[in-house]
């Protein structure tokens, strides 16, 4: 089966942590995979070194054949810039598909943005190419929740686009039950939707690097780690203020914030305003290195803003935290909070409540070490049983077979993604 994986973001940009294993899993099942993407500019909105915008670029990256088409680089709070970014990739990928549609038996679409799905939907109609859409972020809900100018008018337009794409998708994969519930409310047939939990980069945990940070070396300190994007949705200010409150009771408490994003400078200003010397920032770290850092944490933290939308998502860092086997503090609500509580992997509190999070931090610090370790083990066990690559890939292959009606992807035992050594010599068949 010839599959084109279409995503506006791909390596070397930070993208969904399951992507590389997914593509390797498809290749292992006999598929010929091509990646269609743009020129890397996320999350800063500026082209990565070594790249320039061209009409077309082909490269082999991590063993995958990658086709890049032009887009307008932008990722800031400007609605004009964001629209230009999405619409330019929509046009480029639409043209690519109209030219190359007969080369593929199926398209696998990573969403957001929905404009990617619309492009594939249009050339799929003309070329009779079925497509599977993997929804990681509900639109137009997430757009409506942003603070960009003109979102009300834009959300109404996007709602129609989403319904058009969903009606024509052969299969729809969602990352948590709440998303399925929302799609059912929109009238999407239940037999078209499958819940496939995201997995994390399991290979990184099998052979973590020896990366270390001096901040984590202080004896007797209790180290909290937040790792990920510093955006408005992540609401890291709640975490910073909670740590500042908890430090009054817990002088050995320390917070390491690893990542970057549009809110970074503002968050640094909040830390300076609070005089929180026990809060440190570090630039984004590769997943393989994070696997070496996570075990140094006494607890891992995830925060989101209080929005109805975020009750129906599971932040991708959740799976990485659970796979790391460390106790988790979740200042979120909905599916993600229920997952952590059900797994016995940590403590969940309401979002946007620094006092509640500070109390949860104090509880975590004051509980016996063995109790915290048991939380970590429970999270890892739950991950292995329900969220792992083996579980998710088996479900994904089943949906792809149903979408394409192609027996060349036969159901069989799914093994973990190939090792780095094996991938080094791997080609595209």
Image (cartoon, rainbow, N blue to C red):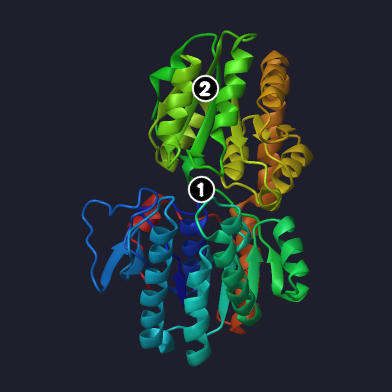
Q: Residue 200 location in percent, x, y?
A: 55, 48
Q: Is the residue 332 above or below the residue 185 in the image?
A: above
The residue carrying mark 2 is 255
Task: Give the quadrant of residue 389.
Answer: bottom right
Residue 410 visible in the snapshot:
no
> In the picture provided, is 91 more to the left or to the right than 22?
left
Helix, strand or loop at mark 1: loop
Of 112 and 145, which appears nearest the observer? 145
Residue 248 location (% of width, % of height): 61, 9
Q: Nearer the viewer, residue 24 or 108?
A: 108
Judge the density around disc 1: few (<14), some (14-19), many (≥20) Cα neighbours within 10 Å. many
Proximity of marks 2 and 1: CB atoms separated by less than 8 Å? no
Q: Nearer the viewer, mark 2 or mark 1?
A: 2
Judged from the image, the secondary structure of the residue bearing numbered disc 2 is strand
Q: Is residue 73 left or right of residue 194?
A: left
Q: Position of residue 253 (x, y in %)?
A: 57, 14
Q: Which residue is pictured at 43% across the width and 35% down the height?
A: 264
Dot label at residue 201 = 1
Q: Say above or below: 245 vs 309.
A: above
Mark 2 burial class by Cα count in 10 Å: few <14, some 14-19, many 20+: many
Q: CA distance from mark 2 to mark 1?
A: 24 Å
Q: Is residue 81 above or below residue 408?
A: above
Q: Position of residue 358 (x, y in %)?
A: 67, 21
Residue at 71% x, 20% y is: 359
Name the image quarter holding the C terminus: bottom left
Looking at the image, can residue 118 be seen? yes
Residue at point 37% right, 82% down?
Answer: 95
Q: Earlier in the sequence, mark 2 or mark 1?
A: 1
Q: Residue at x 34, y 69 (%)?
A: 65
Above or below — where is 267 with respect to 371? below
């Amino acid at each position: 089966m010839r599959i084109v994986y279409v995503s506006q973001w791909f390596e070397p940009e930070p993208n969904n942590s399951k992507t590389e294993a997914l593509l390797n899993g498809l290749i292992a099942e006999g598929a010929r995979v091509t990646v269609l993407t743009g020129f890397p500019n996320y999350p800063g909105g500026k082209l990565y070194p070594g790249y320039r915008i061209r009409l077309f670029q082909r490269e082999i990256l991590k063993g995958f054949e990658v086709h890049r088409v032009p887009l307008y680089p932008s990722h800031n709070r400007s609605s004009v810039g964001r629209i230009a970014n999405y619409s330019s990739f929509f046009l480029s990928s639409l043209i690519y598909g109209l030219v190359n549609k007969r080369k593929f038996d199926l398209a696998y679409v990573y969403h957001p943005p929905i404009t990617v799905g619309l492009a594939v939907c249009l050339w799929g109609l003309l070329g009779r190419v079925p497509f599977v859409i993997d929804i990681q972020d509900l639109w137009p809900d997430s757009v409506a929740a942003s603070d960009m100018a003109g979102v009300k008018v834009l959300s109404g337009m996007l709602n129609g686009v989403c319904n058009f794409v969903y009606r024509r998708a052969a299969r729809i994969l969602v990352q948590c039950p709440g998303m399925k519930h929302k799609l059912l409310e929109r009238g999407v047939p239940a037999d078209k939707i499958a819940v496939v939990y995201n997995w994390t980069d399991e290979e990184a945990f099998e052979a973590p690097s020896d990366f270390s940070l001096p901040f984590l070396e202080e004896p007797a300190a209790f180290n909290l780690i937040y790792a990920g994007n510093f955006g408005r949705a992540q609401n890291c200010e709640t975490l910073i203020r909670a740590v500042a409150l908890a430090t009054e009771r817990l002088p050995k408490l320390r917070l390491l914030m690893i990542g970057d994003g549009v809110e970074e400078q503002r968050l640094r200003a909040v830390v300076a305003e609070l005089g929180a010397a026990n809060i440190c920032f570090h630039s984004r770290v590769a997943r393989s290195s994070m696997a070496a850092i996570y075990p140094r944490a006494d607890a891992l933290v995830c925060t989101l803003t209080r929005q109805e939308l975020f009750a129906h998502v599971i932040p991708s860092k959740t799976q990485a935290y659970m796979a790391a086997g460390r106790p988790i503090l979740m200042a979120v609500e909905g599916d993600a909070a229920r997952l952590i509580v059900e797994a016995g992997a940590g403590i969940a509190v309401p979002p946007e409540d620094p006092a509640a999070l500070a109390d949860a931090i104090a509880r975590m610090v004051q509980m016996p070490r063995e109790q915290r370790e048991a939380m970590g083990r429970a999270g890892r066990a739950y991950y292995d049983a329900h969220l792992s690559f083996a579980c998710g890939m088996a479900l994904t292959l089943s949906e792809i077979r149903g979408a394409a009606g192609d027996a060349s992807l036969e159901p069989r035992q799914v093994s973990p993604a190939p090792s780095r050594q094996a991938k080094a010599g791997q080609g595209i068949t």
